Amino acid sequence: MKKENNKKFYIKTIGCQMNKSDSERLSAFLEGNGYKETSKRNEADLIFINTCGVRQSAEDRIYGLIPGIKRENPNAKIILTGCLVNRTDVRRRIEGSVDLWFPIVDLFNLDKELNKIWDINFNKNDDNFSCRDDYLKVSPKIDSSFSALIPIGNGCNNFCSYCVVPYARGREKYRPVKEIIKEIRDLVKIGYKEITLIAQNVNSYSSSSTDFSDLLKKVNDIEGNFWIRFITSHPKDMSDKLINTIATCEKICSHIHLPAQSGDNKILEAMNRKYTIEHYKKLILKIRKKCSLKKFILQEDLLPVSISTDLIVGFPGETKKQFENSKKLFKEAKYDLAYTAQYSPRYGTTAYKLEDNVGKKEKERRENELLNILKKTAETNNEKYLGKRVLVLVEGKNKKGFYNGKTCTYKNVNIIENNKKIEKGEFIMVKIIKTMDFGLEGVLI
């Protein structure tokens, strides 16, 4: 039975899907103990800011966000969690504006901390209070009715020189197989159509004698019509066994996100990425050979696998010649999608000690060059869809009033159909009649 306390909370989530998943668990934990969620932060008694520190731009958002909250809701208690919670430099800057600095991994102690603020006795019989060894055991309040993020673990052991994640989230810790399978099976039973396994490095997963490939097979064996996605993979852990599993399991989506971060070996070494660009390119070739034109659940026409990546431009010391190797990679890999970023120093990382000697304008120029290559390769890849019949998972309507969704290869599809009512979370068959660089258009079959 929930303990009512008449207090309202608001959660602002910044950053990756892991942060979104954490917020879903935070929301469930609070509601399970009497707090009520509100979509209006000016009505909230507690305002949680789930922070991201991967880029300076994400960090800067909180410096503008907190003063705004203080102005519109001066009586609210501000609680900061997420990747910036342990950063001493961030604390020094805004300590006077934050009421509680709370690491999400300590979610099972949140009742004690909030009790200090509100003097409320929590209901200790609530199921979520039995999860004190691991916050990921808290049942989430999932934002979507058809698509779920399933964290299979937390933390990172890789220590890439530019990345704060190992310091923010600690070392890798993975959930037991049975726990993950039960969560997914329960969601599929109530109609979820898309299951996305998430972790800082999903393909590092290990629990007892089960690796990530084994886990994927077990999820694939769950009865029901649903898609399996996963992010993010580290190239050093992308094994032949895993590629074969992706190629042969009919529920695993034909989209692989494989961050390269650079196309130059010296920069990769400085980033502590633990692979060479030659190894990375061989992986791309294997994936395209094994996973293209695979048989896929409910899909009629066979589709080529899609590959996306992350890449940083302007890493300290990156010369124009080294950047040319990143351009070469983009041309050879023929990505469908890429998330490029201009390097920004991250406090506490190894690269923070290096001179950030590539200017802002040069970083912008390099990023634009990569985006121009990407547009061409993405458009060429999408042209292969013209006339194809593809299965689309409907996500809603776009600004023009057309239904839209994604294919198993993570292609955005606008459905040029206004007359028929289509439900969110429904699988529908669409014939592609138009292709663009980052999208497709089709009609209902």
Image: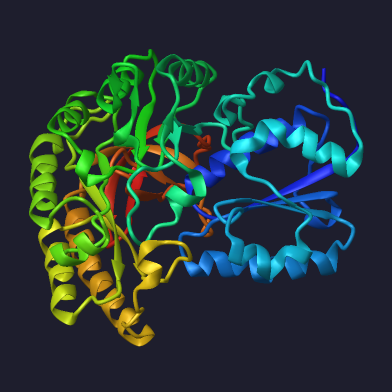
Left/right placement of residue 112 relative to residue 374 reads: right
Q: Which residue is at a point 48% across and 15% down the rendered structure image?
A: 182
Q: Which residue is at a point 35% across and 30% down the rendered structure image?
A: 228
357 w.r.t. 184: above or below? below
- In the rendered image, residue 326, in percent from the top left (x then y), is placed at 18, 68
Q: Nearer the viewer, residue 123 or 170?
A: 170
Q: Which residue is at a point 82% across and 36% down the rendered structure image?
A: 35
194 w.r.t. 334: above or below? above
Name the colouring of the figure: rainbow
Q: Nearer the viewer, residue 169 or 224?
A: 169
Q: Quadrant of the N terminus?
A: top right
42 w.r.t. 229: above or below? below
Q: Quadrant of the C terminus?
A: top left
Answer yes or no: is residue 214 visible. Answer: yes
Left/right placement of residue 76 relative to residue 383 reads: right
Answer yes or no: is residue 264 visible. Answer: no
- In the rendered image, residue 376, in percent from the top left (x then y), is placed at 19, 67
- In the rendered image, residue 4, in percent from the top left (x then y), is placed at 89, 29
Q: Please tell me in which quadrant of the rendered image residue 215 appears.
A: top left
- In the rendered image, residue 201, in percent from the top left (x then y), is placed at 35, 41
Q: Which residue is at a point 32% across and 47% down the rendered structure image?
A: 158
Q: Nearer the viewer, residue 52 or 268?
A: 268
What number of labels is visible?
0
45 w.r.t. 127: above or below? below
Q: Nearer the viewer, residue 143 or 156?
A: 156
Left/right placement of residue 227 relative to residue 319 reads: right
Left/right placement of residue 201 relative to residue 332 reads: right
Q: Please tell me in which quadrant of the rendered image residue 304 appears.
A: top left
